[in-house]
Image (tube, rainbow, N blue to C red):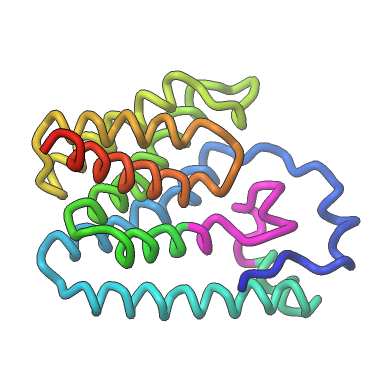
Amino acid sequence: MIVGLGADSESAAAVPVPALSLRRELTRKGLHLMATVVPVSYAADVPRVIVIWALAFALAVAVAVEIGRSRSARARSVFDTAVGGLLREHERRGPSGATWLIIALLVAAVVFPRDLAVAAMCAVALGDAAAAIVRRMTTRSAPHRKSLGGSAACFAASAISARAIAGFGWPEAMIAGILAALAERPRRPLDDNLRIVIAVGCGILLWRMGFS
């Protein structure tokens, strides 16, 4: 169970948080890019059980951090000093994007066959990062808004990685890119990391059931 921040932080959360600078956006999305090691390792035949246990351990650590910053002012202060500058406004009231990223990767590993899981993980690690970086570089007036440029970057990164890392043929890789771009655009429901994994994994699975 992941808990949000406590009531004593609600007043701080009410203060608008400015958009992240390009430097901070790049630093934030560096986590996504580092997470690429998970699908690359999985595609290189690292056993599924090892991937699942590694992600489960990472999630346990993330949940402990979330609980700590929700219940302890000192823990929250340390957390905010370390990475507070990289948080989006809604993450100050609930789980961070890093926690959602780990959840998304774990869901992919547990639910989907290896190649689908790898494609879904790549869409989250590379596609979502590409969308955010391109959007931040090209939409200066409203960097939080979704943009066609960001969606195009998500599509390209997801499709190319599905082809190169997951071993999809181009038709399926293109579909994975489209699904990732569509899932990345809405703000709700669910976190976009989890939305992308579900959309890509389930979408390709249904495609195979209907046309394979």
Front one among 212 and 204: 212
Q: Quadrant of residue 182?
A: top left
> In the visual, does 179 lie left or right of 39?
right
- Magenta residues, as a range? 82-100
> In the visual, does 88 lie left or right of 128?
right
Toward the front, the furthest residue is 210
- Relative to 162, is 35 above or below? below
Residue 180 in the image, given as x and y percentages of width and height: 36, 36
Front one among 78 and 90: 90
Residue 44 located within the stretch drawn in magenta: no
Figure disc tally: 0
Q: Quadrant of residue 200?
A: top left
- Relative to 167, is 159 above or below? above
Residue 207 in the image, given as x and y percentages of width and height: 22, 37
Residue 9 in the image, given as x and y percentages of width and height: 84, 63
User: Quarter holding the C terminus?
Assistant: top left
> In the visual, does 44 lie left or right of 11?
left
Residue at x-position 67% and y-position 76%: 67
| Magenta stretch, main secondary structure class | helix
Residue at x-position 60% and y-position 59%: 96
> In the visual, does 115 lie left or right of 155?
left
Residue at x-position 43% and y-position 27%: 150
Front one among 79 and 3: 3
Front one among 60 and 169: 169
Residue 88 located within the stretch drawn in magenta: yes
User: Quarter holding the N terminus?
Assistant: bottom right
